[in-house]
Amino acid sequence: MATEQTARRVFTGLIILSIILLALVVRPFAKAFFLAAVLAGTFYGLYSRLSRKLRGHNNLAAGVIVSGVILALLLPLGGLTAFVVTEVSDGVKFVSDTVQREGMEGLIGKIPSPVRGPVERLLERIPLEQAQLDETLQQQVSTQGGTAARAVTGAVAATGSIAFQTVMMLIALFFLLTEGARLVRWVESVSPLRRGQTGEILREFRSVSVAVLVSSVATAGVQAAAALVGFLIARVPAALFFAGVAFFMALIPAVGAAIVVLVAAALMFFSGHPWAALFLAIWGTVVVGLVDNIVKPLLARRGMHQHAAIVFFALLGGLAAFGTVGLLLGPLIVAFFLALLRIYERDYGRPTPRPGDPATPGGPGGGEGLIIRPSVLSAETRERVPLSPTPPENH
């Protein structure tokens, strides 16, 4: 007996050790795997239909979906990048041509009036002699060179990390689409829960993930549309570009779409349109900023089957606890908790009879007692327990 207990303890310790080691291995890719699982659950219906149309070529169907995700990420980003590069190139060319034709005074004359005064005062503080100007520039370059190098290095590292996580997410998405059904069956077979309970929890996870993902994209679209209306009213140049940026910023909770509207308001103010800037500032704060807190819970609750207040606090709580990925983790944790309560009440709970229930004496069933099937009683019990209510004697 002691040997058996020792073996169980050692085996339990080995399982715990393997879980810890597995967590260390998966940790660098945790966010990528999590997002891949969410996307796989979202696109699994499309994947199944596409696989049937392709006559069972699962790899080809998964490749088409992954390619679509890549295009959905790269095409808008490439378009915005091309627009920014074009505008910056045109701006540099304009400054260069103006300085060559009219000099610095001509360039300053073209600056909007709210900015012209500070620029002129700044130029007055710059030494007029070329030697002093060169010495000042060299000092500034030597002082800020290290800071600029560190900033560039950090930006390159962050970009490389995002690209790496994106590639890992796409690879995991491909394999989860092709092997997802087999993985779910394996999890259900090794799960210690009752038959069907694991599948119910996984379906709840998928439903919540799809609801949160779809609501996030839809809310970003609504915020971008609201921002576009404000840009058109205020006559902001390149309104579609700013609306596209607002859509992408709306997908980043720490930034949001309202910041894009406020930046556009600042640009309008410095370009000499104070009333348009004031309108955009109010529009971005009141309309665009509050749409996220109203539309997203209303859209998410349809797939989560929960009260809008629960969805709202789950989103904010997850964001505060886990960062950006908490927008998915928060509702998933709440849904997991509620699913466990529902399963426990259904499969393990023993409700006590209450007065007024149909199966209890005095209930709405005409005063009948609890019905007992004869097949579950022994012969001796059938003689002592009445199988039907005995009518009262008339006195």
Image (spheres, helix red, strand yellow):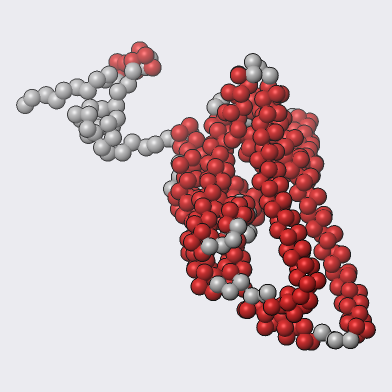
Query: Hey, which quadrant is residue 273 in on the image?
Result: bottom right
From the viewer's perspective, is residue 294 above or below residue 16? Answer: below
In the drawing, does residue 392 fall left or right of residue 59?
left
Asked if residue 50 is positioned above or below residue 237 in the image, the reply reads above
Looking at the image, which is closer to me, 167 or 332?
Answer: 167
Q: Give x and y (percent) for residue 237.
A: 59, 61
User: Looking at the picture, how far across and down is residue 83, in whole percent?
Assistant: 69, 53
- How many labels sit on residues? 0
Q: Is residue 106 left or right of residue 358?
A: right
Up-down: is 60 above or below 374? below
Q: Which residue does the image show at 48% across and 61% down from the upper left?
A: 233
Give x and y (percent) for residue 257: 58, 58
Question: Which residue does the image show at 37% across and 37% down from the upper left?
Answer: 352
Q: Quadrant of residue 129?
A: bottom right
Q: Quadrant of the N terminus?
A: top right
Question: Can residue 158 be seen from the camera position used here?
Answer: yes
In the picture as drawn, the residue positioned furthest to the front comes out as 101
Q: Residue at x 53, y 46 (%)?
A: 218
Near-viewer residue (293 or 25): 293
Q: Which residue, as the protein is rendered here, is positioned at the far left?
A: 395
In percent of the image, x 66 and y 78: which residue is there? 115
Q: Quadrant of the C terminus?
A: top left
Q: Can the viewer see residue 336?
A: no
Tell me where residue 93 appears, x and y as whole percent: 77, 63
Is 377 on the left or on the right of 282, as rendered? Answer: left
Instruction: Judge by depth and name the residue closer to the eye, 211 or 100.
Output: 100
